[in-house]
Image (cartoon, rainbow, N blue to C red):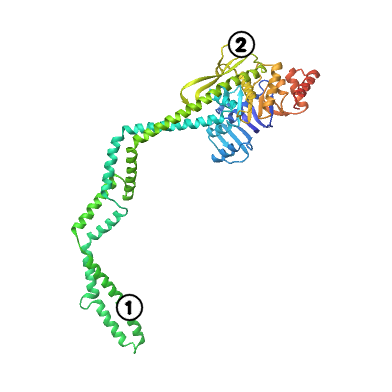
Amino acid sequence: MLTDLSIKNFAIIDRLHVNFGSGFNVLTGETGAGKSIIIDAVGLLLGDRARPDLIRTGEDEAVVEALFDLSAHPDLRQELVDGGFEGGDELLIKRVIARSGKNRIYLNGSLARLTQLQSLTARLVTIYGQHEHQSLQRTDTHLCLLDDFAGLGPEVDAYQRLHREVQDLEERIAQLSAAERDRQQRLDLLSYQGREIAAANLRPGEEEELTAERLLLQNAGRLSIATEEGYDVLYGAEEAVCGRLDAVASSLESLSTVAPLLGTLAETVRNALFSLEDVATQLRDYAARLFFDPERQGAVEGRLALLSTLKRKYAPTVEEILALQEKIDGELEDLSDMEATREAAGKNLAEFRSRLLDCGGVISSRRREAGLRLGTAVAAELKDLAMPKALFQMRFFPLPEPGPQGLERGEFYLAPNPGEEPKPLAWIASGGELSRIMLALRRAAPDGESPPCLVFDEVDAGIGGIAATAVGEKLHKVAQELQVLCVTHLPQVAAYADSHYRVEKREEGGRTFTALTRLRGDERVLEMARMLGGAQITERTLDHARELIGLSGPG
């Protein structure tokens, strides 16, 4: 529900703020006072094009803000959160139009895109009448309205799931057919690649091991010299370090009784001797294992060259080449089974197509029956709306292929007067007629899905008298379930308002301003009298105004 609307520097509106209530809200005022400008401002909230000429003369930007109550719409609250906006029971929309062209949209204080705004507000507000937003002129909505009337929601949902399955299978088969054309060439390439990688018998970590081994083989001579010389110096040669240290330790030990400190130092020398003897043993053993094998070095170099070639051709590392081999094996298996896969997909497609046609046939039958009932119901409602002889129909046009909404396209047709051939509603209906037809649809199909706020602009165009009273009564009944905003010139319609607002234009200092005031008590009676009698307000018109308000019910 729309609870607050604020407008700043928009057309002839300087500043305006209004609280709307639930039920039937009526806006009245003299011609040119700015009623339609307020509707245009609401249209911006629905994603209408932001034009610089809408900015009030002398100002740099115009701002329209609206506050919606989302407490009854958990789906929209969740959509806000999913979109990265602040959630909660309220939605604050702000739209800024700048002469510089840097227009901005805010949802609950955060910048938003136009598509995000349109997605949300399309489910909050619909405007009918002398306005760019006329959903009845979009023929794609006609079937949706009929399906709501017929209660076909679950059946259409099931059909659309089948339709998506059919589309997915058709796309899969097309991909398989395209792949079949290149299948043999791809098989040859993958088979060659698979054989080459498999023949290499790769294993993880192999390249690192071979690199380390090559380094040892390349330096075998130097390693042999270093280890043998080290052993001789430490232990093997005459006058080796270990022998001399042993002599030093023995000499110190013999004098330890004379000088205890020498015993301690002898122990330190002896420990160093043991360590060096261990080093000498390891050098001797390592030197014994060293063996320069030119054939092994050639094998290592050859293996590393093979790995380098495979890495250049397939992947940067041995591990990635092995992963590629697994992928190649899987694709080879898929290509080998492609014919069987395509055959299975074809059988599934035939089955789903059959189910889709059966489901679509049931929907088509129920649509035709519901179309007759809806046409009769809408025509009956239009009799009270100054269109007593109007013929309203839903016509169906079979599609060459099942579409996302069914096996046919549906469109409303209208013959406003007797003897005329019905023509597409979107072609021939005026704004006032569209508003009345939408009102008739809402009355004929009250259980259909609808945004919580409906705005009717000039719904009373071209009518008066009893028909005007019927329009007011019907709008009031619609407003018992939904919030309704209505711009009207007819007192018979305004009399049914739950909340009555007067839009008036005034001049101050050579500038034009528009103001909006909620009317109560005598103020409302005066406005109704003005609508009844124009500039000359008499006791008689005042009494007539009170009588209208009293007869309509709301005060």
Residue that appears at 19% across and 60% down: 293
User: Which of the pair 8/451 is nearer the observer?
Assistant: 451
Please report the residue visible at 27 percent of the width from the left and 81 percent of the height from the top: 246
Residue 458, above or below 7: above
Query: Which quadrant of the figure has residue 47?
Result: top right
Look at the numbered disc 2 and give the secondary structure of its residue: loop
Q: Position of residue 399 (x, y in %)?
A: 47, 22
Q: Quadrant of the N terminus?
A: top right
Q: Amino acid at mark 2?
A: Pro
Residue 211: give x, y in percent of width and height.
27, 56
Which residue occupies the extreme right position in the image? 539
Q: Which mark is residue 271?
A: 1
Q: Are marks 1 and 2 in contact (CB under 8 Å)?
A: no
Q: Position of residue 67 (x, y in %)?
A: 63, 35
Q: Earlier in the sequence, mark 1 or mark 2?
A: 1
Q: Under tag 1, what secondary structure? A: helix
Whether residue 552 is visible, yes or no, is yes
Q: Which amino acid type corresponds to the residue marked 1 in the rendered image?
A: Asn
Place of residue 391 in the rendered image (x, y in percent of width and height, measured from the top left): 60, 15
Specify the quadrant of the image occupied by residue 536: top right
Number of marks present in the image shown: 2
- Provide the residue designation for mark 2: 418
Foreground disc of the pair 1, 2: 2
